[in-house]
Image: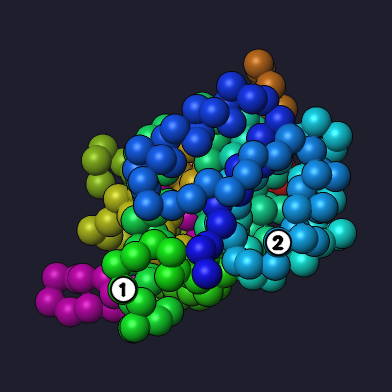
């Protein structure tokens, strides 16, 4: 059985561009169809029970794509969401999603998607050979989710002549200060750790921690409130005792995502 690749994108030019990118990166994959609407997608899913890897735009011609999942079974599908907006990332986590890509889609981001699938392929089925047609993308998506759920539970902190472990839930935020990464606990104790914020993003549970800007990753329980700032930006105010000398600013582009994260 050949596993289908489906593109759901209401803009024909963007759909054609994505098809070309996929074909260049994975020439062995068959792109079975290109759809434009929620209605057409539901119909396709009803008539195509085979597993599929789906590249799905969130805002379609006749509505938001999430309504598809109320009408059709996607349990054996793996979804790569593609969108020009970041405010739907929280909803995407609840679906069998492999990735959430912002438009314009970069080739390097697509490479990471296929690299992620390849990385877990051996875990899913040791008998899978090199042929892409033998990949069960649904199983791969489930394994990606399982792997991503192996989030860090503690950090081992090196002291002068000893080591101390700190549970993740005791850390209020991580910050970069003069090229050093600090883990700051709810007791406001600072510990230097040998991690970049980008590396920490991969290790921390996204329900509990978020990269707010280039300098801070915050524990959701460390946040007291958000305040409006100029140009549709936000200021994050931490709970009493955790105040920082550096103003924690959320960009206009990320403001809606931060609000959604806090409102779950």
Instruction: Say few, some or many: other residues with alpha carbon within 10 Å of mark 1 (under 14 / 14 to 19 / 20 or more).
Output: few
Earlier along the polypeptide chain: callout 2 or callout 1?
A: 2
Q: Which residue is mark 1?
A: 129
Taking the view exactly as shown, the residue that stands out farthest to the top is 231
Residue 95 lies left or right of residue 250; in this view the side is right
* The quadrant where residue 33 appears: top right
Query: Does residue 43 appear anywhere in the picture?
Result: yes
- Picture colour scheme: rainbow
Vertical order, 264 against 22 (above or below): below
- Secondary structure at badge 2 equals loop
Instruction: Say few, some or many: other residues with alpha carbon within 10 Å of mark 2 (under 14 / 14 to 19 / 20 or more).
Output: few
Residue occupying the point 22% across, 78% down: 163
Q: Which residue is mark 2?
A: 48
Q: Which residues are magenta?
A: 155-175
Taking the view exactly as shown, the residue that stands out farthest to the bottom is 126
Residue 94, numbered circle: none
Query: Does residue 233 appear anywhere in the picture?
Result: no
Of the pair 158 and 108, the residue shown nearer to us: 108
- Secondary structure at badge 1 equals loop
Residue 187 lies left or right of residue 240; in this view the side is left
| Placement of the C terminus among the 4 image quadrants | bottom right
| Rendering coords of residue 24 (x, y %) | 35, 38
| Rendering coords of residue 32 (x, y %) | 58, 48
Residue occupying the point 56% across, 57% down: 4
Of the pair 7 and 116, the residue shown nearer to us: 7
């Amino acid at each position: 059985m050949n596993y289908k690749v489906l593109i759901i994108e209401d803009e024909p030019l963007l759909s054609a561009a994505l098809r070309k990118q996929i074909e260049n990166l994975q020439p062995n994959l068959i792109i079975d169809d290109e759809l434009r609407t929620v209605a057409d997608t539901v119909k396709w899913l009803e008539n195509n029970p085979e597993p599929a890897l789906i590249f799905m735009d969130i805002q379609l011609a006749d509505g938001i794509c999430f309504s598809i999942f109320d009408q059709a079974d996607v349990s054996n599908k793996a979804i790569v969401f593609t969108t020009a907006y970041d405010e739907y990332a929280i909803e995407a986590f609840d679906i069998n999603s492999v990735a959430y890509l912002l438009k314009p889609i970069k080739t390097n981001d697509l490479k990471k998607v296929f690299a992620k699938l390849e990385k877990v392929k051996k875990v899913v089925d040791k008998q899978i050979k090199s042929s892409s047609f033998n990949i069960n993308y649904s199983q791969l998506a489930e394994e990606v989710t399982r792997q991503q759920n192996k989030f860090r539970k503690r950090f081992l902190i090196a002291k002068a002549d000893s080591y101390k472990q700190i549970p993740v839930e005791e850390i209020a935020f991580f910050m970069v200060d003069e090229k050093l990464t600090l883990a700051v606990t709810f007791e406001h104790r600072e510990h230097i750790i040998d991690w970049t914020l980008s590396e920490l993003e991969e290790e921390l549970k996204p329900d509990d921690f978020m990269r707010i800007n280039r300098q801070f990753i915050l524990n959701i329980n460390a946040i007291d409130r958000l305040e409006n700032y100029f140009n549709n930006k936000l200021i994050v105010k931490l709970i009493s005792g955790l105040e920082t000398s550096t103003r924690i600013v959320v960009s206009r582009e990320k403001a809606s995502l931060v609000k959604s994260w806090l409102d779950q």
